[in-house]
Image: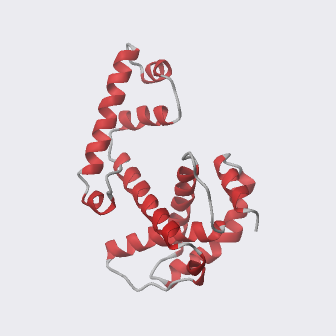
Amino acid sequence: MAEPNAYIEGILQRDGNTIRQIYEECYPRIEQFILKNNGTASDAQDVFQEAIMVVYANAQKSGFVLTSAFYTYLHAICRNLWLRQLKRKRQLRVTFSADWEYMDRAELETNLLESERFELFWKRFKALGADCQRLLRLFFEGASMKIIMEKMGFGSEGYARKRKYQCKQKLHELIVNDPEYTDLSDGQL
């Protein structure tokens, strides 16, 4: 297995070889975990792909430092995502992996909370209209107001700014009105 930071760097650069290596080395154990816990191969694929997106989002945050083995971190995210799905289905028999004993409890709780917030954010993001999703994706990718204006077909940068604000407000409203928000909130969004 490669160094944890090499995996993180590969994910950030969207390097196909790194992602393929992560699938080859980590996916079989994640799939086995999900299959043992009332899941299907399709569930395992969905959870694994979502977990890679969570790793990508977390790694983009300034100050992100991976202090555990990459597999342990990835497994923690997958486990959390799967437990949430099981909770929704009310199937709570879960077999724990020995890898958990090697992760610092505070780090594990922080990582799990972040992945739950990330999941809530994207669930609510998908509930936005197509125009708001497109506008916010451009904004998240660092596009200037001028580029957003041009790509969205707005008449002015001022209107693009106004629409961005409205879309962000709508997303914020969807998130804070979600029943899961109260469980995940510690004053942060």
Q: Is residue 174 left or right of residue 39?
A: left
Q: Residue at x 33, y 60 (%)?
A: 184
Of the pair 20 and 77, the residue shown nearer to us: 77
Number of numbered discs: 0
Q: Position of residue 188 (x, y in %)?
A: 35, 50
Tell me which residue sits at (75%, 62%) in the image: 3
| Residue 75, percent from left and from top | 57, 71
The quarter holding residue 152 reads top left
Q: Is residue 129 left or right of residue 31?
A: left
Here the colouring is secondary structure
Residue at image x 49%, y 86%? 95
Residue at x 41% of width, y 61% of height: 116
Whole-percent x, y for residue 163 in the image? 33, 26
Residue 163 seen in the current view: yes
Is 100 on the left-hand or right-hand side of 178? right
Query: Can residue 43 be seen here?
Result: no
Q: Nearer the viewer, residue 171 or 24?
A: 171
Q: Is residue 124 above or below residue 42?
A: above
Relative to 154, is 64 above or below?
Answer: below
Quadrant position of the N terminus in the picture: bottom right
90 to 182, vertically: above or below: below
Q: Residue furthest top?
A: 155
Q: Quadrant of residue 114?
A: bottom left
| Vertical order, 164 against 182 (above or below) | above
Q: Position of residue 39 (x, y in %)?
A: 47, 78
